[in-house]
Image (cartoon, rainbow, N blue to C red):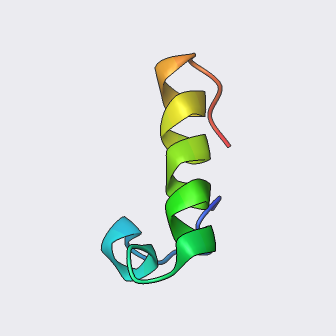
Amino acid sequence: HALNNLKPINFFTMPTGLLMVDQVLGRIEEGIFS
């Protein structure tokens, strides 16, 4: 849901997309599912 049902690879072409993916992965590592 955090990535609007898009695959993370879709975001790697956008600078802001990389930040979004990084934030989601950080939440998963901390056990906070978005």
In x, y percent, where is residue 5?
52, 74
Residue at the far left in the pictured view: 9
Q: How many numbered callouts? A: 0
Quarter holding the C terminus is top right
At 31% from the left and 73% from the top, the residue drawn is: 9
At 50% from the left and 62% from the top, the residue drawn is: 18
Residue at the far front in the pictured view: 15
- Give the answer, above or below, for where 33 lies relative to 20: above
In the image, taking residue 10 as reference, residue 23 lies left or right, namely right
- Give the answer, above or below, for where 7 lies relative to 34: below
Quarter occupied by residue 20? bottom right
At 60% from the left and 30% from the top, the residue drawn is: 27
At 58% from the left and 67% from the top, the residue drawn is: 3
- Give the answer, above or below, for where 31 lies relative to 33: above
Most foreground residue, 17 or 33? 17
Most foreground residue, 4 or 22? 22
Quarter occupied by residue 23? top right
In x, y percent, where is residue 12?
38, 73
Quarter occupied by residue 1? bottom right
Residue at the far top in the pictured view: 30
Most foreground residue, 22 or 30? 22
In x, y percent, where is residue 29?
47, 21
